[in-house]
Each structure stands twice: as C-alpha cells, then as structure tokens.
Image: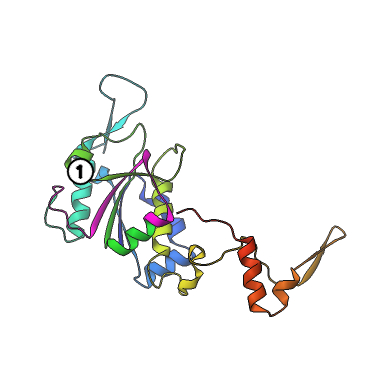
Amino acid sequence: MHFHVITLFPKAFESYLGESILKRAIEDKKIKVSFYNPRDFVKDKNKRIDRPPYAGGPGMVIQAEPVIKAIEAALIRSKEKGVGSKKISASTKIIFLSPSGKQFTNAYATTCAKKYKNIIIISGRYEGIDARVRKVFKTEAVSIGPFVLTGGELPAMIMIDVISRQVSGVLGNFDSLEEKRAYSGEVYTRPEVFIHKGKSYKVPKVLLSGHQAKVEEWKNKKAKPILN
C-alpha cells in the first residue's frame, strides 16, 4: 500500500509516522508514504500558491495548477501513464479531503486496503483548493467527521492509520482488529487489585476464572458497537 499525500506541510506528519506501529509498518515495507508539496511545482520565487477567491470572500484559495502538477507527480511515481480520469488505473484512488464529503468509516478503509495499491490524498488549507482540480481528475470527496479543521493534514493521518491497520502484516496479529471481534471497551492488566485514596479497585472475577466461554459471554455483553 502506497499513500501519496498532497500537502503544504509534509513535516506535520513526521512525528506520528515516526513512532510505534506505523513506523514499523514503513520499515517493514508493508506501507509507504510519499509527500508532494504544491509549492515545489511553482515558478514563483516566493513559492506562493494562494490567491484571493473570485467574487470575493474571506481567506485565500490554493491555486489549481500546482496541485494538479503535484498529483501528476504522484501518478508518475505510482507508475501511472495518464493524468485524465479515464486513464488512471483501477488500483489507484484519489481522495479529496472535504468537510462536505462522504463519511470515512472502517468499512471504507477496508475497501481501500483490499482494492487499491496507491491512494492519493489531497490535503487542503486556507479557504480550500480551486475546484477545477476535481474537474481534471476523478476524485472522491471524503470527510472524517462533521466538523471543520484548519487543514487536511490531521484527516490524512487518520486515514493512513485506519487504512494501514487493514493491511495484512501491519498489526502483526490480525486478530488485533477490534472491529473483527467482540471488543468490550473494557480491558484490564496487573495488578489484580490496587487501592486509590482508600478505595479498592479489582479486576472482574470472570476474567480471572479461566473459563473461556464465560469470558467471551462477558465480552459480548460489554461489547461496544464500532461504526462501519
């Protein structure tokens, strides 16, 4: 799985991708993440890529051409031959992050992991990206929730995390996927009992019983629904 992220702030990803499971997944070549900064595709010596919106309004809009060139660079790296919507292979998906887009879910992530080898994620900033980008490429608008953030970097990281978990080998043990099993939302570890401010807190007896059927019954009763 190769993620291609179009972003003005690639360094925003360094900390999260440089730790824990995703870091190991990258090192083990289970996933790959590449970045394309639209500023690298402009001739302006100041690397300016934003302009005021036509018809007025607050904020600035990211120009279409630098973003288009960044997407084309991602397609070339994906070994794609064309840039038109009809020429992009079925194994490549272009996602346009938008608060008004389709809701991102575990089911969506699973489909992406199974169907695509390359996922291009377009992260916007400011007032947004010139809408003509979506007329050049066949993109799907996707939202991670009913709220607005200052940029698309956090949504992109969330999508990379959720989709990567569905890639075989990333979690080590595929049974670690909570959505594939009865996940109680309550987990316990040692010590069996601890005292805090005079009050004793114990692990539920059923989890110490060794009776697997009763443990599973307890988990099913406590199970929390995971949205798909």
Q: Residue furthest right?
A: 198
Q: Residue, x 26% and y 54% (percent of image)?
A: 93
User: Closer to the camera, 218 or 193?
Assistant: 218
> Does the magenta-highlighted stretch encompass residue 106?
yes
- Amino acid type indicated by mark 1: Ile
Left/right placement of residue 196 relative to residue 33 reads right
Is residue 147 placed above or below 187 in the rendered structure?
A: above
Q: Residue, x 44% and y 62% (percent of image)?
A: 18
Is residue 54 placed above or below 85 in the rendered structure?
A: above
Q: Residue, x 28% and y 45% (percent of image)?
A: 140
> Residue 45 in the image: x percent, y percent?
22, 38
Q: Residue, x 50% and y 69% (percent of image)?
A: 176
Among the 4 quarters of the image, the one containing residue 27: bottom left
Q: Answer whether residue 191 is visible to the viewer in this image.
A: no
Left/right placement of residue 79 relative to residue 131 reads left
> Residue 206 in the image: x percent, y percent?
72, 72
SS under mark 1: helix
Disc 1 designates what residue? Answer: 68
Q: Tell me the magenta residue range.
A: 84-108
Is residue 61 placed above or below 115 in the rendered structure?
A: above
Among the 4 quarters of the image, the one containing residue 113: bottom left
Q: Which residue lies furthest to the top in this view?
A: 55
Left/right placement of residue 82 relative to residue 24 reads left
> Residue 109 in the image: x percent, y percent?
38, 57
Check the picture and name the quadrant holding the N terminus: bottom left
> Does the magenta-highlighted stretch encompass residue 58?
no
> Residue 130 in the image: x percent, y percent?
25, 34
